């Protein structure tokens, strides 16, 4: 009787002592890693919701101290930040649309083995991954094209990432059955119709992946703007951020109404925390919903065609 | 091949091309794009051998041969920027490479599915933070007065922390470890995927033979992802002279410049920056770097090819 009950209770294999220790060690390690990753993130958010006195006195460790929204008020009063926000949204929208269009236009023909010269064209693209003209010649070309200091300088250079094109091509080659093409072509489907009617509807997973990659890339991009844009009304968010966060160029308008030097310094630091949150929010908010797409991209990318 | 055969063959090729004309229409824009933004700059690289004059343009500036390369190799900056580039890359590689592997194995070993999912979700987050924000975070964090580091130090030792930014070498550690913090999760994805493909039968057989979980990590998990590890290691070695510009440039200050001036930032300063303007000299340095990178990648890919079926192209 007693034995029978025990058998029912313990169906699973009991860990040996060694295993139990090992699992505990791994669990602790994972928790330590999670703390290392999360603490800085929580600290930023908490600081941004604290009062400037608490930030200046260094009293914030993990949770907000003296809850306040001063930092956010200051951020939204700053004209540069608002302009940067608007510009970045526009660059991201138009840039990503162009990126995805170009990537598909290249990936589709290159995924077709029956395209005469397919190997040569593929080489033309992949070669640019391992050798490029470098910073200065690219700058000269961009300035020759007359797009320095125009929104086009934010969209055209880097409009096609060969890496993303290869991800897309790999997907088209491996995930869309070849029989479909044969069936369609027997029915008289042209290459173009095949793209619009078959390829496009079937490749939504990979389109989601590259759209996200490109969009995050635009949102976070700093380099193109840094090199090609000097007019402040065209600055994207990241350039505005760099001026405030790293170069410490504070717009005096946002801290004028404060009298003492210390409260100015306090607000300057508080503002930085709020600014970090405000600028990273769009990407991090959509992140939980799209996480699996990003991961999928890495997986497709690792099977190189 | 007789002339008739040759004629038939050419006709066949032309017929195939005509049949596929729509595909070429698709390719038109991407090709035009890379010709302008990738191949035009590649031809522009010849200004490294010319005295570039904006009024004369890329193709009409006078030739000077290897003048700018000699100038670079004889300058005191040459050894310094190459040494800094190598030190930063090698330190990054050695510190950064093993951590995602350990992380992936830990995640794989976890038995609590919820914790597993949550861990994967959380460790990828920092990857999406922009370089500017990351560097801003580093500056705020290690601020001895208002940063997390200063606050904790004050809490424990009841005195103000030392200013880490005053020490040039702290740039190195901050650069490398912030990179690890940002990317260890993302870099582990590929290993986690490889671990999932390990057959369960191997694990079951080992369990029946009495292997502990730790023994199975070393006898089954690690050997099965070894090809992935080796390929990634080789590819990473191929990138050691290819150090990104943005993060280093943003982290530079007068104190750490001695250690933080690398090839890409130096190219920018000599060339485009307001105090630079020497396009030919900057291009020569950049070209030297590109050629070294190119050679490294080709060698490394040859080796990777020999080691496994995976390769870059």
Image (cartoon, coloured by chain):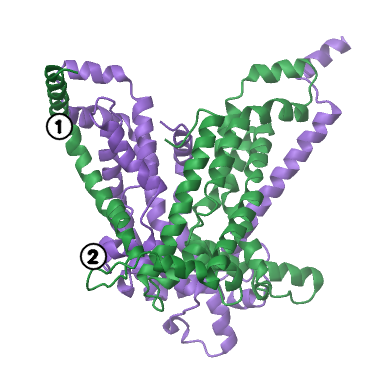
Q: Secondary structure at mark 2?
A: helix
Q: Position of residue B117 (x, y in %)?
A: 59, 37
With respect to residue B278, does B47 lie above or below?
A: above
Q: Where in the figure is residue A44, as x and y percent of width and height?
A: 58, 63
Chain of residue at mark 2: A
| Distance from Cα at disc 2 to Cα at disc 1 | 32 Å
| Colour of chain B in the rendered structure image | green
Circle 1 residue: B21
The single residue placed furthest to the right in the displayed view is A2
The residue at the point 60 percent across, 36 percent down is B230
Front residue (pair B9, B138)? B9
Query: B102 left or right of A282?
Result: right
**A270 and A293: which is toward the camera:** A293
Give the color of chain A as drawn: purple
User: Could you tell me which quadrant the C terminus of chain B lies in?
Assistant: top left
Measured along the vertical axis of the image, is residue B217 above or below residue B55? Answer: above
Q: Residue A175, how many percent across, how many down?
A: 37, 25
Q: Which residue is mark 2?
A: A144
Residue in the image at 37% along x and 53% along y: A132
Q: Is residue B102 left or right of residue B312?
A: right
Q: Pick the quarter of the image with the N terminus of chain B.
A: top left
Query: Residue B298: x percent and y percent?
Result: 47, 42
Q: Does any portion of residue A147 appear in the rendered image?
A: no
Which residue is at 30% across, 59% downward? Answer: B44
């Amino acid at each position: 009787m007693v034995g029978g009950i025990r058998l029912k209770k313990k169906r699973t294999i009991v860990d040996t002592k060694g295993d139990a220790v090992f699992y505990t060690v791994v669990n602790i390690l994972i928790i330590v890693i999670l703390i290392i990753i999360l603490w800085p993130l929580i600290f930023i958010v908490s600081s941004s919701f604290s009062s400037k006195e608490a930030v200046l006195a260094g009293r914030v460790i993990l949770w907000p101290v003296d809850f306040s929204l001063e930092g956010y008020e200051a951020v939204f009063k700053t004209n540069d930040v608002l302009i940067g926000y608007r510009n970045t949204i526009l660059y991201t929208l138009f840039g990503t649309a162009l990126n995805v269009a170009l990537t598909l236009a290249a990936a589709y023909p290159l995924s077709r083995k029956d395209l005469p010269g397919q190997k040569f064209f593929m080489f033309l693209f992949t070669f640019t991954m391992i050798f490029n003209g470098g910073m200065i010649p690219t700058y000269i070309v961009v300035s020759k094209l007359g797009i320095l200091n125009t929104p086009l300088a934010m969209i055209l250079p880097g409009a096609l990432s060969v890496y993303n094109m290869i991800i897309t091509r790999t997907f088209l080659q491996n995930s869309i059955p070849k029989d479909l093409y044969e069936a369609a072509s027997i029915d008289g489907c042209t290459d173009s119709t095949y793209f619009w009617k078959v390829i496009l509807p079937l490749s939504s997973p990979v389109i989601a992946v590259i759209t996200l990659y490109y969009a995050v890339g635009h949102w976070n991009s700093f380099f193109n703007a840094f090199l090609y844009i000097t007019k402040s009304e065209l600055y994207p968010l990241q350039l505005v951020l760099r001026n405030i966060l790293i170069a410490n160029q504070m717009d005096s308008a946002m801290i004028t109404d404060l009298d003492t030097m210390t409260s100015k310094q306090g607000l300057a630091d508080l503002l930085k925390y709020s600014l970090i949150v405000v600028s990273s929010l769009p990407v991090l908010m959509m992140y939980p919903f799209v996480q699996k797409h990003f991961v999928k991209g890495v997986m497709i990318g690792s099977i190189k065609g | 091949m007789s002339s008739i055969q040759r004629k038939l063959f050419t006709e066949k090729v032309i017929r195939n091309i005509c049949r596929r004309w729509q595909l070429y229409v698709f390719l038109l824009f991407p090709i035009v794009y890379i010709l302008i933004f990738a191949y035009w700059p590649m031809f522009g690289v010849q200004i490294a051998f010319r005295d570039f004059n904006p009024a004369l343009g890329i193709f009409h500036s006078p030739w000077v041969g290897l003048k700018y390369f000699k100038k670079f190799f004889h300058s005191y900056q040459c050894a310094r920027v190459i040494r800094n580039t190598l030190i930063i890359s090698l330190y990054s590689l050695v510190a950064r490479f093993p951590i995602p592997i350990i992380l992936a194995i830990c995640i794989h070993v976890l038995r609590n599915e919820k914790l597993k999912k949550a861990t994967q979700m959380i460790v990828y987050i920092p990857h999406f933070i922009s370089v500017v924000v990351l560097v801003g975070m580093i500056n705020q964090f290690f601020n001895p007065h208002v940063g997390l580091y200063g606050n904790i130090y004050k809490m424990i030792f009841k005195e103000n922390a030392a200013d880490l930014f005053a020490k040039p070498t702290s740039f190195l550690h901050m650069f490398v470890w912030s990179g690890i913090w940002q990317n260890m999760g993302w870099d582990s994805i590929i290993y986690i995927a490889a671990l999932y493909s390990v057959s369960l039968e191997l694990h079951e057989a080992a369990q029946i033979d009495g292997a502990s979980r730790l023994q199975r990590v070393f006898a089954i998990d690690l050997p099965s992802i070894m090809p992935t590890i080796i390929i990634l290691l080789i590819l990473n070695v191929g990138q050691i002279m290819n150090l990104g510009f943005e993060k280093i440039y943003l982290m530079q200050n007068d104190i750490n410049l001695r250690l933080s001036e690398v090839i890409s930032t130096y190219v920018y300063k000599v060339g485009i920056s307001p105090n630079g303007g020497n396009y030919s000299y900057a291009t020569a340095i950049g070209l030297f770097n590109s050629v070294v990178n190119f050679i490294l990648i080709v060698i490394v890919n040859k080796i990777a090819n020999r080691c496994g079926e995976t390769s870059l192209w």
